Amino acid sequence: VASALMEPLDGLAELTAKLDGGDWEVRRTALEALGRLRGGRGHAGAIALAGKHLEDEDVHCRRAALSASLRLVIPPPPPQDASEDEATAAAAMRKLAQESEPAMQLLEKVIVRLADQDWGVRRVALGAAAELAQRGNSTVLAALREHLADKDDDVRGAAVAALGRLAPVGEATWISILTHHLDDEDETVRSAAVLAVSRVATPENREALAKLTELAREDEDDKVRRAAATARTGLLAAGRPG
């Protein structure tokens, strides 16, 4: 596989020309195409081209470059109807990709983009960080935590969601942090927090269970109530013997 990573890639030269000479709309479209380019995943030239535009002057292009870079480095998750064996194999492939040099280099660049002035770039970067890092990565967790107080609802929600995927399961500090965001003023952030808590909390965590119970009964948003009820049921079931 490694020997193929620098072989000529059909369509790459054309996209390079568009990215070098086009206006922002042309560049954005070219970046979106780059992320979907057949044979592009793992190709060093394609990865480098997308990475170059992580600092594009246009915010839409920076967002597209983040998405394209991620597609070129990390394989997609398995479909929902995948068998257990297929899901296990896909998880193993994603883990290998996360441990690769291109993924680690991209993660460093993504962390830089977390400080972008554009809320949309920050949001996409948070999602990318959750895909690139492995659970328990302390450097990434610290970077994500800074965005829990972001003034933009979508960015806060993305930060909460990313922490739900990366925070160590059962660690009281992170469970408490995520539980705090079950009280966020925005319902989409609360929904993200419900899922995040369900991924990190354990049945022994009474604070999380109590808050999920409260939300399931009293939250003003129907989706949040239903999600909290489902998360609570899942946690209780996980704590039952057998």
Image: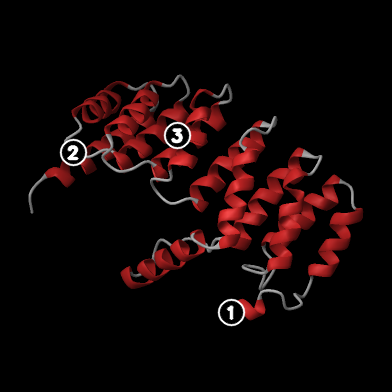
Earlier sequence position, callout 3 versus callout 1: 1
Does dot 3 land on a helix, a strand or a loop? helix
Q: CA distance from mark 2 to mark 3?
A: 20 Å
Which residue is disc 2 drawn over? 203
* Residue 55 located left or right of residue 190: right
**Identity of the residue drawn at 79% across and 68% down:** 12
Q: Amino acid at mark 2?
A: Pro
Q: Nearer the viewer, residue 144 or 12?
A: 144
Residue assigned mark 3: 160
**Picture disc at residue 228:** none
Query: Is disc 3 surrounded by few (<14), some (14 to 19) or many (20+) residues within 10 Å?
Result: many
Q: Is residue 192 positioned above or below 90 on the image?
A: above
**In the visual, does 143 lie left or right of 10?**
left
Q: CA distance from mark 3 to mark 1?
A: 36 Å
Tag 1 residue = 1
| Pick the front one: 90 or 142 | 142
Task: Say if 85 sits above or below 174 in the image.
Answer: below
